[in-house]
Image (cartoon, grey):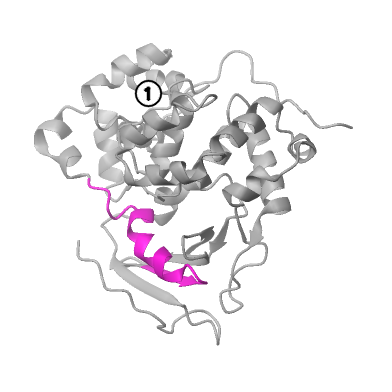
Amino acid sequence: MTLAAPLPRTAGSDRPGSTADAEAAWEAPEGYSLATTCFPLQRGDGDPTFAPHPGGLWTAFRTDEGPVSLLLTHTRRELRARAWGEGAPSAVASAPALLGLTDSWEAFDAGPFHASLPHLVREARRRHPGLCLPATGRVVEALVPTILEQKVTTLEARRAYRYLLRRFGSPAPTAGRVAPAGLVIAPTAAEWLRIPSWEWHRAGVGPQRSDTVMRALRSASGLERLASKPAAEAGAALQSIPGIGIWTAAEVTQRTHADPDAISVGDFHLAKFVGFALTGERTDDDGMLRLLEPWRGNRQRIVRLLYLSGVRAPRFGARMTIQDHRGH
C-alpha cells in the first residue's frame, strides 16, 4: 500500500474556518472498516476521548508536541486524517499505525498457514478481509483504563473512567469549532498522580486499583519508552510492576503495539468463549492456550476473528457482582 504524503492546511472540513493544521490521506484496504479496527481503543460508547462523526470518528489525545483533536474518516477508497492543535503533525504522522495500516496480515493469509485455520476462522477472515490491528504507541493512555478494568465488571470500570476523565481530563482543541462538545484528552501521568484518594473513591475505584495506577505512573517516562520496544519486551516490562500481570500487559500491548499474539489470560469470559467457538465446549485458560498453540504468533488475530464470526458462547454460572465503593 502506498501512503500519501501529508497535506497540511488543505481545505475540506465541514464548516468555514475549520481548515486542519495537518492532514493526510491513504488508500483504504479492500473491505476495511474504521469502526471495527478502532473498536478496541474506545472504552465503551461513553468514552469522552472519542466521539462519532458521520463519516468516521473523532478522538483526542496528547503528543510530545502538545494536545490534538483528530478526525478520522473513511470512504470506500480513502482513509483521511485531519488534525487540529499543537500535536497535529505528530498525530497525522502516527495515523497509519492508529488506523492499522502498518499491520501486515501477509503471513497469516499465506497458503499453508491459512489452510491450517479452522473453517470458522477462515470464513470470518473471508468476510472481513480488511481487518487491521491498531497501534497507538501511547502506553500510559492504554494502561490506566486497563488497570481500572482489573477484576471488576466492564460497566463498573467504564463508569469510573468516564467520571475521572470528565473530572480531570482537559478539553480537546476546538478544531475550528467543528469538534464535538465534550471531547476531552485523558490526564497526563502527572495529573493522574495528583488525583486525591477521595476522588478515586467517588469514582468507585477501590484502593488496590488506584494504588496500582499510582505505582505504575511514578515511572511514566519509562512506560512511554516501551512503545518503541517489541511487544513481548514491553509486556514483560509491564509485568515487572507490582499489580500488573499477564492480563493487563496483554490488554495494553494489543492496543499500543497491535500485538498479534497477546492473549488476555485471566479474562473472566475469554477462555470460555474461545473454547466454545473452537470446540463447542467451554474451557479454562490452560485449555484456551492449548487450543490456540498451533497459531502462536497470531493468536490475537484468531481471537479477533472469532469475535467477528458471530459465535456467542452461552452464559452460565454466577454473574460478577458490581461493587460500589463510594459513600452514600
Q: Residue at x 26, y 57 (%)?
A: 30
Instruction: Name the foreground residue: 204 vs 56.
Output: 204
* The quarter of the displayed image where residue 105 is located: top left
Res 45 seen here: no
Q: Secondary structure at mark 1?
A: helix
Up the image or down, 118 lies above or below 20; here it is above
Q: Residue at x 52, y 66 (%)?
A: 68
Q: Residue furthest left?
A: 112
* The quarter of the displayed image where residue 155 is located: top right
- Compared across the picture, whether 239 is left or right of 293 comes to right
Residue 320: x and y, percent? 64, 20
> Mark 1: which amino acid?
Ala
Residue 281: x and y, percent? 40, 13
Up the image or down, 182 lies above or below 288; here it is below
- Compared across the picture, whether 207 is left or right of 231 comes to right
Q: Residue at x 26, y 58 (%)?
A: 29
Up the image or down, 305 lies above or below 290; here it is below
- Compared across the picture, whether 65 is left or right of 115 comes to right
The magenta stretch is 80-104
Instruction: Name the foreground residue: 182 vs 78.
Output: 182
Residue 101: x and y, percent? 29, 55
Q: Is residue 84 covered in magenta? A: yes
Res 127 seen here: yes
Instruction: Name the foreground residue: 30 vs 238.
Output: 238
Q: Residue at x 47, y 67 (%)?
A: 87
Looking at the rendering, in which quadrant would you find the N terminus?
bottom left
* Residue bearing mark 1: 277
Q: Is residue 102 covered in magenta? A: yes
Density class for disc 1 (Cα within 10 Å; few <14, some 14-19, many ≥20) is: many
Looking at the rendering, in which quadrant would you find the C terminus?
top right
